[in-house]
Image (spheres, rainbow, N blue to C red):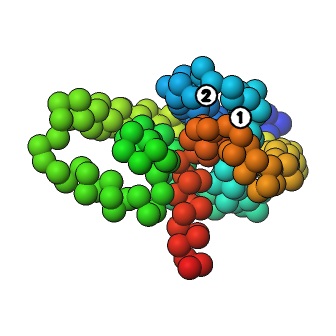
Amino acid sequence: MAPWHLNRTASSSETLFLAPVWLTFALINLVALTLARLTFTIWDSRLLFGEADLPTISFYGLTIDIITLSVLFLPVAVLDVVCPFSKTIRQLKPLIKFYLMVITLLNISGEMITPFFISHFDHRPTAALLGPALNVISQWPLKQHQYKYIILMVLCMTVIRYFLSFLFNALWQSAENHGFSLTRAKAMSLGALMCLIAPLWYLPSASSIEHLFDHNLGAETVVVNAVLSLAQSWSLAGHQ
């Protein structure tokens, strides 16, 4: 009979607890969105020096960011619950990595292109504004500061992409090295899933958000993130 510690290692390697992986990516997204909201608040003089209700705006912005991320990361959290076995999850590793990196890069790039849309259209990126934005960009030659911003954005996204890839591989390896029993892994995965579902119950009503926008000029730029703005505009366009 094999020693007890070898049996423990063999049994724990049967499951893979992925919550630390996707929760880390969710935290990175939340930090990026929060920093972007702070930057846009400082940038917009109507909010910084006007009579805007900054605490309420910040609270609504943080709430909407958390809800947006809860929806985006929900598929991975559900997968972590229904497929706890290492063999199954390992087959899906490339897909999980691609999904987490795409979500993160979309959120970060969406916030990085938002200043361009605000400067030209006084609005967050929407489906209706993509065409006019492309027309503005196609008007060569671009100004010097526009070239610099495009180069800076490409460099930043390249560095972030490699960093996220390295981080995912390190987190995945750590998850494989710290196996858990099936019962404990499923319990922790279910708890992490509940952490994503809980914020959905606190979705602000449309009337309260409209009231906030009506009484605080420029609040929409700070409260609504770029991914949500694009998703809402495409959804509305599909129903028209």
Cα distance between the residues tagged 2 and 1: 9 Å
- Residue 166 image-quadrant placement: top left
Residue denoted by label 1: 57
Q: Secondary structure at mark 1?
A: helix
Q: Earlier in the sequence, mark 2 or mark 1?
A: 2
Residue denoted by label 2: 47
Neighbourhood count class around disc 1 (C-alpha, 10 Å): few under 14, some 14–19, many 20 upward: many
* Residue ID at (24%, 50%): 137
* Residue ID at (74%, 59%): 78
Residue 189, compared with residue 35, is above or below; it is below
Give the residue type at disc 1: Ile
In this view, the residue in front, 97 or 50, is 50
- State yes or no: discs 2 and 1 in contact (Cβ < 8 Å): yes
- Residue 48 image-quadrant placement: top right
Q: Secondary structure at mark 2?
A: helix
Q: Is residue 223 left or right of residue 126?
A: right
Q: Position of residue 172 (x, y in %)?
A: 58, 41
